[in-house]
Image (cartoon, rainbow, N blue to C red):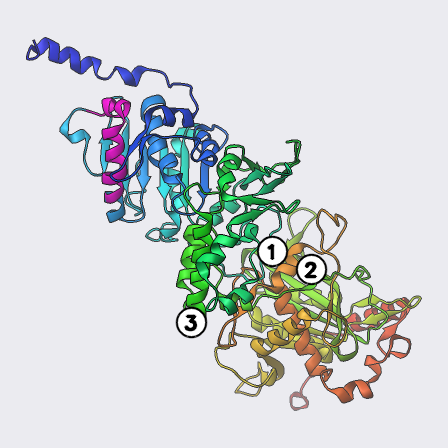
Amino acid sequence: MPDDPFVLALHDVCSAWPALLPPNRVPVSQGVADNLKIARPGGASGYWDPSETPYMVLPTDLLASRVHSAVCFVGPAQTGKTVALGEGWMTHAVLNDPGDMAIFQMTQEKAREYSRQRIDRALRNSPALRAAMGVASRDDNLHDKQFRNGMLVRIAWPTVTNMSSTSYRYVFGTDYDRWDDNIDGEGDGFSLMLKRTTTFLSRGMVAVESSPGRPVTDPNWRPATPHEAPPVKGILGIYNRSDRRRWYWQCPHCASWFEAAPGLSLFKLPSEDQLIEDARTIDIDAFARQYARVVCPAEGCLIESAERGKMNRGGRWLQDGLTIDSRNRVSGTPLSSSIAGFWLGGVAAAYVNWETLIRKQLQGLLEYSMTGSELPLQTTANTDQGIPYTSKHLAGSANDEGPADRPDDEVQRYIVPPWTRFVVASVDVQGGRNARFVYQVHAIGEYMEQQLIDRTEIRESKREGMGTEFAPIDPAKYAEDWDILTERLVLATYRTPLDDREIKVKLTVVDTGGEEGVTQKAYAWWRRLRLKGLASRVMLTKGGAMRTKVDWHVRESMVGGLQGEGDVPLHHLNPNLLKDEVHAGLSRREPGPGFYHFPRVKGPKNPNGWLPQSFIDEYYAEVRNADGVWEQIRARNESLDLSCMIRAGCLKLGADKARFWLTPPSWARPLETNSDVVTSEQRREIKAEVLARPAERAVRRSAYLG
């Protein structure tokens, strides 16, 4: 009797029994394949088939990992990633390992659309999922789905309200690169999602997927590891924090393994400059058909698109640091991370046609050649090829070759080369909690050819600190901390190739900008140097962002005095012109005027090197925009700033003039006759005598007082 109250009560009691069942120990991909039935009007119908998108099996299985806290998947549109990681993960969780779940779409409208088109259809067409759905009318609404086992699925959009207060065991974010970088001022979406799973410890999991949507801002970026992505925000920023997995294929002809790299590099197309030139005259469709094949990087084998399915079924994800040979032996040390990261290119995507990939690129180049618009190129790069887009102007500002490509193995730290004429040092003042002096020293040759001989940070003062340690340096608060520069640079010498001969630092260029207190401490330090007779060896500078073009490099003014009568010379620098000249020198391929000599940076091939890779990276922390103004794109740019200051110091000394080198002053002559070259004994005597001089003007009693 269906209306019998005892029958109804028994039904209510028994309906909750699935919540008491232990989780089914099956891989997530199997749980999805067994239970998720996909049926879309006008499209294919059937259960989710992992053989169609084999590259989604491992990312899906790692959703149950107790080692990782998140899964990140980067790939072009229409690769099957949302089905597997979204409604697929939900299906497995409901039926095999229940836990409250939140799904975030990019906007409220997209959340409504996702709920209607994807979640509701999965519930209607998947028998096991439909049977698990709650029977009350309130259990199934637009943004909330309640199941009989007690599991709740919330479909929402990224706002601080939706991403706060409630804990979820599972959190999924789709189309992440279409989200705001900062959610209502509370932080990035990925961090907010991770916070929702904290109480579940290792049983919680976050997954994000997206095609790249953030543009490249650094045209000079080069990967430090084979799988590193460009330094952009969004999904690739998360990927770079992960273990960085890429999809690898085995060539069906030579058995070599190679990466199915994002982008179009595997098609071996003509250069982009050539394609832009030919875009208006070639038959685009015929060209796309001709090049719609992959060239094996190992042996040059031509691989037709019909072989992609087989290669995908035999493909493998490899973490950064691993390699695989033709006998399927994996070697290397994998990068480890709490985030499992995957980056798939359009060339491997099951639903992306190779011919279409090339055709869209050519059509975008045609549009660019005729109108200058880059929107079609950006769209196909992001959504078809699965790569972040680099604008043409930005790509044009990239340096084809730089110091990292031509290291000078003759460069030694603290030793000047035989062609040195004088030495210039520069100092950048860094404030805040990580206060320090950063200095760089160059040996200067004829016509300002330069070689790096030192790069150091001063973090400790000579003030007493905790225990036996010195106190941290603080240039903004302690005037005496500046005196370290006198000893370390102004009175410093560097070894020469001559026996027992050292060369003085001719000029120390110091930036006076920074946090409050730095400028006045710098002026006071210069006044102390004047009393010691060393002021001519120091150049105080002030730079700044100049949004308009001016035709001067360095201008001097007097500052620091009372009633407008300055007593300290301050040199104002034009950073745009100085950076133009520094980058011109960096771009030279052969030694000569303005050329920079740098040592080989420290790395796996040079473990004993003294110069970190970050030193070279800092030179490319800024790019020149269309207006000729340099804009910073990386957090640290000390190498570039310090080199500009050394360039300004050379200009002050007159080294940019041809007549300077025809009749050089005594301190700019060859080492054998240079007046700044001393013996080690002379250096000690000079240093002791200078430091013994009073740093304060003697106060005389006025004759008026008697």
- Residue at the (35%, 27%) spot, across then down: 93
Mark 1 or 3, nearer chain start? 1
User: Which percent across, then down, holds residue 357?
Assistant: 45, 52
Mark 1 and mark 2 residues within 8 Å of each other at the beta carbon: yes
Element on which disc 2 rests: helix
Find residue 14 and report its horizontal and vertical position in percent: 21, 13
Q: Position of residue 510 (x, y in %)?
A: 65, 72
In the image, is residue 496 above or below residue 5? below
> Label 1 vs label 2: CA separation?
10 Å
For the point 44% across and 66% down, which residue is it?
366
Specify whether 578 is left or right of 675: left
Q: Label 3 sits on what residue type?
A: Met
Point out the stretch of residues depicted in magenta.
Answer: 113-134
Query: What amino acid is at disc 1?
Result: Arg
Q: Quadrant of the C terminus?
A: bottom right
Q: Considering the whole magenta stretch, tell me its main secondary structure.
A: helix
Nearest to the observer: residue 25 or residue 158: 25
Distance from label 1 to label 3 (Cα)?
Answer: 31 Å
Residue matched to label 2: 404
Q: Secondary structure at mark 3?
A: helix
Query: Residue 663 is drawn in which quadrant?
Result: bottom right
Question: Is 194 situated above or below 648?
Answer: above
Q: Residues within 10 Å of mark 1 (few under 14, many from 20)?
A: few
Residue at the spot of label 3: 370
